[in-house]
Image (cartoon, grey):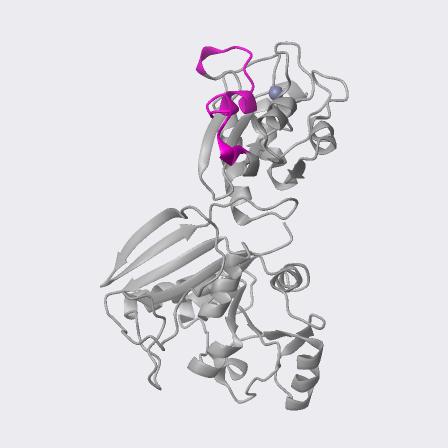
Amino acid sequence: MTRPYVLLSAAVSLDGYLDDTGPERLLLSGPADFDRVDEVRASVDAILIGAGTIRADNPRLLVNSPERRAARVAAGKPEYPLKVTVSASGGLDPDARFWHTGGEKVVYTTDAGAERLSRTGIAADVVPLGPALGWRPLLEHLHDVRGVRRLMVEGGGTVHTQLLQQQLADELQLVLAPLFVGDSKAPRLFGPGTYQGGRLRLVETRAIEDVVLMRYEPTAPGTGQETSPADRHWLRLACELAVRCPPSSTAFSVGAVVVDADGTELARGYSREAGDPVVHAEEAALAKIDPADPRLAGATVYSSLEPCARRSSRPRPCARLILDAGVRRVVTAWREPDTFVEGADGAGLLVDQGAEVVVLPEFEARAKEPNRHLLG
Ligand SMILES: [Zn+2]
């Protein structure tokens, strides 16, 4: 993975607004939630806000707790997370608090924006990304050049909307405050546009004084070779299913999940499940779906091991079953070794027939774990 883990953090009113239209920033949370936010800030490598939020709120974006800052330093990290902002035009006020508090700052901008910023003498590392801004190159630069592994995004709504719509957010931490704004000119958290279909996954709810924190994860698979954060979730689940396989000395332990393009799980399976001594994971999962289900054409199969290309126990190998089901995207952790079949190349068969195969090597060790006794 060449992008940081991206955590969106926001608080909204009951009617979905981030703020009102008054000159002072509307306080949606109370002290206990601000302290929670402080804790999250202390846990990340960088905090990002849009240029509009600097203009509107003039925030400092600090870790306020001296204990948390001391713990960061003791862990070998900078006292404050890197502060990041984004401005295509470079129209940023050099007197904003953002530049004059905390630790290092970086501005991502365009070539034209960098020229403008060089004349203002802003106290930050200015990184031009070319003629236009792009979230993918920005996140890759943060990861590869600045070493950022966890990024907290604190708004505004445009930034949150773009990151979620472009499938770049790993997690949404949303605080719901028990009050109304009632002004249609106020800024909303999420704007119109194309989001993932289907439902996000609720991973936590927590009452904090009178607000409620909800943590969600997106669920939709990526497209083609472009991966989404949910791809990693589903492949992790496939690896967990592999651990449930009845042990065997003559076949691999594999888990598989079939997921619709909108993030809905269609079926899951694992090797030798339900007392069938030869069934494969992908085969077991696909057998649970009506072959006429129109969602299969847009679905992704997650398999902890590359689908097989040849097998003696069944007429059709899993790569063929996947193609025959109409599925055109497979995400896997690990290419099949020659343990049982010489030159097993299920990925080659899939790609030859027009399917996309994505290998996420970060899951290889996990996928191999239940097969250690077979790998010598
Ligand atoms: Zn198979």
Q: Nearer the viewer, residue 343 or 297?
A: 297
**In-image side of 92 versus 293 (left or right):** right
Classify residue 359 by image quadrant.
Answer: top right
Q: Nearer the viewer, residue 375 or 239?
A: 239
**In-image side of 184 versus 256 (left or right):** left
The percent position of residue 33, horizontal first and vertical second, equals 32, 65
Q: Residue at x 49, y 11 (%)?
A: 276
The percent position of residue 259, horizontal first and vertical second, equals 50, 36
Q: Residue furthest right?
A: 343
Q: Residue at x 69, y 70 (%)?
A: 129
Magenta stretch contains residue 33: no
Q: Which residues are magenta?
A: 274-296
The percent position of residue 344, horizontal first and vertical second, equals 73, 22
Total labels drawn? 0
> Is 39 located above or below residue 181 in the figure?
above
Q: Please state the quadrant of the image where ligand 1 appears.
A: top right
Q: Nearer the viewer, residue 249 or 254?
A: 254
Residue 15 visible to an observer of this rendering? yes
Q: Quadrant of the C terminus?
A: top right
Classify residue 235 by image quadrant.
Answer: top right
